[in-house]
Amino acid sequence: MEPTDILRQEHRVIEKVLSATDAAVVRMSVGGLVSPRFFADVVDFARAFADGCHHKKEEEVLFRRLGDRGLSSEVATLAEEHAEIRHLTRRLAEAVTQWEAGDPLAPDRARRAARHYVDLLREHLREEDQLVFPTVDRTFSESDRAEMADALAALEADYGGPALHEKYAWLAESLEVEARATA
């Protein structure tokens, strides 16, 4: 399997969570109710799967190889976006904690942080899907791509392997179901 196919598959799982989160944000914007637990699950997904597994693979394998090919400025931009996504995840986590503690302003902070998170990560995924991954597919030889796929598989094993993917694919599905049920 191509390394970009592995990462694209992970993007599709992340997009499910982004769609569910977007639906929750829209519902809150029109006065609908959303549980803080929903956003706590989004934070868990963001930290463990989107960042802890997916972004780490990109940073440790894809970005390094792109940097070696002279694409350092592009890599720097992508890495900065990862840092901003982590910052937004922290903001959302803080708002959820405050919400669960009874802070009446926290739901709005959570909504705003989630809105920014969804918007930034959607754009980031689009850039990677439409610009970065085709560049990798064109620029790297078949043997280079096979080496990258092997490196991604090794990292995958370090980050929890199939069990991690199953857990967070299930959570993504659950969040989608919850978002549809309360729409």
Image: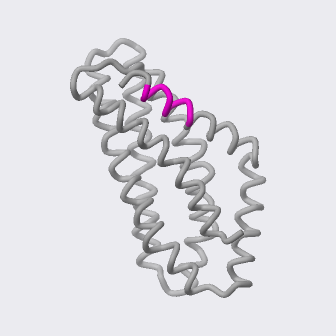
Place of residue 161 in the rendered image (x, y in percent of width and height, measured from the top left): 76, 49
Q: Residue at 55% of width from left, 30% of height from top?
A: 174
Q: Is residue 128 above or below residue 165?
A: below
Place of residue 68 in the rendered image (x, y in percent of width and height, measured from the top left): 58, 83
Place of residue 153 in the rendered image (x, y in percent of width and height, measured from the top left): 75, 61
Place of residue 24 in the rendered image (x, y in percent of width and height, measured from the top left): 36, 30
Q: Which colour scheme is used?
A: one colour
The N terminus sits in image quarter: bottom right
Q: Is residue 149 above or below residue 145?
A: above
| The one of 110 and 178 positioned closer to us in this rendering | 178
Residue ranking furthest to the left? 30
Q: Residue at 39% of width from left, 21% of height from top?
A: 182
| The one of 58 and 103 positioned closer to us in this rendering | 58
Q: What stretch is highlighted in magenta?
A: 173-180
Residue ranking furthest to the top? 102
The C terminus sits in image quarter: top left
Name which quarter of the figure residue 99 lies in. top left
Is 175 on the left-hand or right-hand side of 62? left
